[in-house]
Image (cartoon, grey):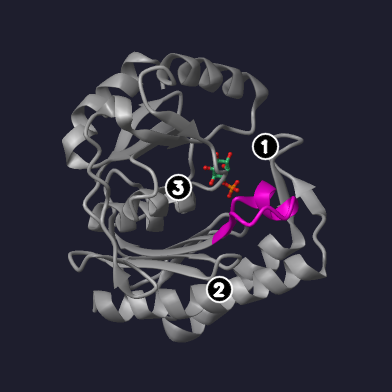
Amino acid sequence: MTSELKDLAVSIAIEAGELALRRRREGVSVAATKSSAVDVVTAADREVEAFIRGRLAAARPGDGFLGEESDSALGSTGLTWIVDPIDGTVNYLYDIPSWAVSVAVAEGGTDPATWRVLAGCVVNPSMGEVFAASAGAGATLGGQPVSVSAPSSLSQSLVATGFGYDAERRREQATTVSRLIGEVRDIRRMGAASLDLCALAAGRIDAYYERGLSAWDFAAGALIAAEAGAVVEVADVREGRRLVAAAPPGIAEEFLSLIRETGA
Ligand code: LIP
């Protein structure tokens, strides 16, 4: 079952990525803003989500849907598809080749506190990279197994994070980074949570944290990272914003402790 769900997620995410890439090459502009003047949505975001939603409705008509750009649907099968049609929208708008199509399917609803993500796929169309995982069956990049790094220490670890769309929240997050940056190898801010988590899965970074993500930003990437061997924590809700943190087992406890100490 989870293998078939993963195959469907991969098939749809690849096709959606091809559509998004075509629209990028045709030219992209802001269609609207959401939580702030810099929280943008493009026509492609909406078109790609509609495409994904249509393919899922045809393949699994009774499943629920939760996407970034359209109304959610409960469904009747107990499964819900959790979709970010273009994660890294600002990168997409600026034609920075670090954005992704993220498709996950979960049972138990859409609250990370209670859901069980069964399968997921994250596609980076600009790089031609397809990350995928199904629960208990490992994670892959291009169909080949991937696994997290094994950093010798936290001070030797490359850490990725991200920032919110609200200026005051970004100031707070910058303060956290200023406290953290001297304790680790370096920081990377790449602009798409799903790709940050896949980079962790592939050993391209050693740890990741971010506060304030939506379920669709990390549902697939968190499964891929966990199936690649990462300890993934989605908790510590503060002012309605959860903390997502992930790291290899050897540094996970120390890393989680450090990001809490620094106020993440
Ligand atoms: C993005 C996340 C990223 C975060 C950005 C933004 P979007 O999602 O993937 O990690 O730092 O602020 O939230 O809005 O591009 O789908």
The quarter of the rendered structure image containing the N terminus is bottom left
Residue at image point 17% right, 37% down: 250
Local secondary structure at mark 2: helix
For the residues labelled 2 and 3, the Cα–Cα distance comes to 22 Å
Which of the two marks, 2 or 3, is nearer to us in this view? 3
Question: Is the residue marked 1 within 8 Å of ligand 1, measured from its CB?
Answer: no
Magenta stretch holds residue 140 = no
Residue 109 horizontal side relative to residue 49, left or right? left
Residue 225 horizontal side relative to residue 217, left or right? left
Q: Amino acid at mark 1?
A: Ser
For the residues labelled 2 and 1, the Cα–Cα distance comes to 24 Å
Above or below — where is 113 with respect to 8?
above
Task: Look at mark 1 in the image and give the residue it sits on.
Answer: 35
Question: Is the residue marked 2 within 8 Å of ligand 1, measured from its CB?
Answer: no
> Quick check: can you spot residue 246?
yes
> In which quadrant of the rendered view does residue 80 lie?
bottom left
Which of the two marks, 1 or 3, is nearer to us in this view? 3
